[in-house]
Image (spheres, helix red, strand yellow):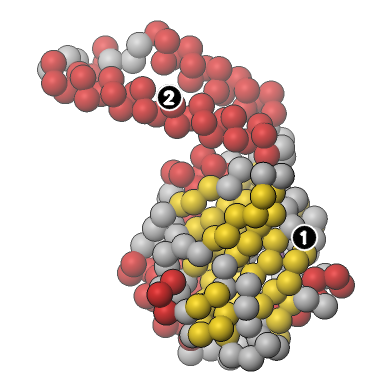
Amino acid sequence: MLLRIPQALPPDELAQVRQLILQADWADGRITAGSQSSTVKKNLQLPEDLPAARQARHLVSVALARNPMFVTGALPKSVYPPLFNRYGGGADTNHFGNHIDNAVRTHAATARHVRTDISCTLFLSDPASYDGGELVVQDTYGEQRIKFEAGDLVMYPGTSVHRVEPVTRGERLACFFWIESMVRQDAQRRLLYEMDLAITALRQQALERAMREHTDAQDIESPEVVRLTGCYHNLLRMWADV
Ligand code: NI
């Protein structure tokens, strides 16, 4: 499942994150790459122990934790602390060729392992400010070319081959990280996500009807919505690994 989360980072936090990381000292992107991806990774990355990286990471983490679409789409069990990258300039720093992310990331500071069920990119640059830089994700139904508004996030299965096209004008800043989900299989997560959206919409419709008809708020839950909500939780119980 490829999922776009608009304004995952609201404008105020986006401006703060950009200011923090633009002033910091960047390093070669290969600091966190595996052996195959290090041969095709040509970008800059913010070393994760810098104070600016820590503060920016915190702003992103807080924004994501309170985003219901992020939580229901990812069902996160463990999130790798967000990292930041930068594409632009010459051929040594403007692209990242085809690769699949490492299956397990180990956080250097804590030695904690995160299985990379979901890969995430949070766009931090206005798309009009740079040319190229599309995230290209290969899927069974073809290639998806992704270049979102600043503040928007894309989630895609960690199993996908993907690349970042060369940035030929301007600069592309992004935040990237991985999620180990409570539900390991993409197809199961997708089903739960669809079901959650449908139940939420049904409840919203019932609430609006109740407000129009001045019904007591306690009487709005239909037995069908209660049963569907139960099915959602029983599927989650069957599939979740916590
Ligand atoms: Ni990658």
Classify mark 2: residues with Cα within 10 Å, few (<14), some (14-19) or many (20+): some
Which is more toward the observer, 18 or 2?
Answer: 2
In the image, farthest residue toward the top = 223
Which is more toward the observer, 142 or 150?
Answer: 142
In the image, which disc is placed on residue 199?
Answer: 2
- Percent across and percent down for residue 106 are 77, 63
- Percent across and percent down for residue 88 are 57, 85
Dot 1 or dot 2: first in sequence order is 1
165 over 3 or under it: above or below: below
In the image, which disc is placed on residue 180?
Answer: none
Is the CB of the residue bearing disc 1 within 8 angstroms of ligand 1?
A: yes
From mark 1 to mark 2, how far is it between C-alphas? 34 Å
Q: Viewed as shown, does residue 40 lie left or right of 224? A: right
- Percent across and percent down for residue 54 are 55, 75
Query: Does residue 55 appear anywhere in the picture?
Result: no
Given the image, on which type of amino acid does mark 2 rest?
Answer: Ile
Which is more toward the observer, 110 or 220?
Answer: 220
Q: Viewed as shown, does residue 141 lie left or right of 56? A: right
Q: Residue at x 68, y 88 (%)?
A: 91
Which is more toward the observer, 107 or 9?
Answer: 9
Q: Residue at x 49, y 51 (%)?
A: 4
- Write down the residue under mark 1: 100
